[in-house]
Image (cartoon, rainbow, N blue to C red):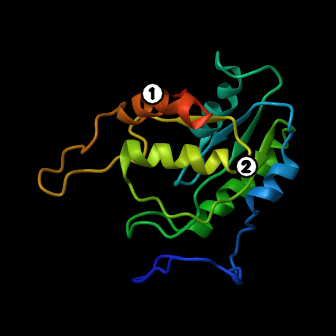
Amino acid sequence: ERNHTYIGGKISVVGTPKRVYPVETPAELFARLPADKDVVAFQCRNPIHRAHYELFIRSLDAPNVGEGAVVLVHPTCGPTQEDDIDGVVRYKTYEVLKAELNNPRVFWAYLPYSMHMAGPREAIQHMILRKNHACTHFIVGRDMAGCKSSLTGEDFYGAYDAQYMAKSHAAELGMQAVPS
């Protein structure tokens, strides 16, 4: 989780933190997701709502997504900004929708990651994270991971900068961007 000091170097043994929500390793997700289908990743740092549902379901029909694709709903549930809704509460909203939806084309997993609000660069980081979790496509929303200027209060990044950057680096990352 978020600390003052981080350590680099070879790791021999690591204990897994205890969390309220289940966390799978990339290898565990690879084993659970279909290997022969496109996997579209949807990530969010907010409680889920109807617009999110429509977004990730409709992404399965995007022009660059193959027939029979599945979606991985993979929200970030780590520590957030002070004014954000707690990760455990967010996790519970996803679990309610998961139970109600019961759709075989929708897979669910939780990422113990804290958003850094780094705009386009964070979109690239999320594409890499999701590729490491067996995804082939990544939904990039308008103003993804955007933030406000601390001086002016204006948006720091342009509304579509993350989408432009994701599309321009998609081939090099071996991922497809699905703008929304």
* Residue 64, placed above or below residue 109: above
What label does residue 87 carry, if any?
none
Residue 99 percent location from the top left of the image: 81, 51
> Label 1's element?
helix
Q: Quadrant of residue 95?
A: bottom right
The type of residue carrying mark 1 is Ser
Look at label 2 and name its amino acid.
Answer: Leu
Contact between labelled residues 1 and 2, with CB atoms less than 8 Å apart: no
x, y percentage for residue 125? Answer: 50, 49
Left or right: 65 in relation to 124? right
- The residue tagged with tag 2: helix, strand or loop? helix
Q: Which mark is residue 97?
A: 2
Q: Is 38 on the left or on the right of 123, as rendered?
A: right
Q: Quadrant of residue 139?
A: top right
- Please name the residue shown 54% across and 33% down the image: 172
Residue lying at 71% horizontally and 50% vertically, measured from the top left: 133
Q: How many marks?
A: 2
- Up the image or down, 30 lies above or below 18; here it is above
Q: Which residue is mark 1?
A: 168
* Residue located at (37% from left, 30% from top): 160
Q: Nearer the viewer, mark 2 or mark 1?
A: 1
Query: In terms of depth relative to the viewer, which is nearer, 19 or 39?
Result: 39
* 9 vs 20, nearest the viewer: 9
- The crowding category of the residue bearing disc 1, from other C-alpha atoms within 10 Å (few below 14, some 14 to 19, many at least 20), is few
Q: Position of residue 86 (x, y in %)?
A: 52, 68
Q: What x and y, as percent, mark residue 10? A: 61, 77
Gap in angstroms between the C-alphas marked 2 and 1:
33 Å
Farthest residue, direction front:
10
| 24 in relation to 15, above or below | above
Task: Indicate which disc, 2 or 1, sits on the residue closer to the N terminus.
Answer: 2
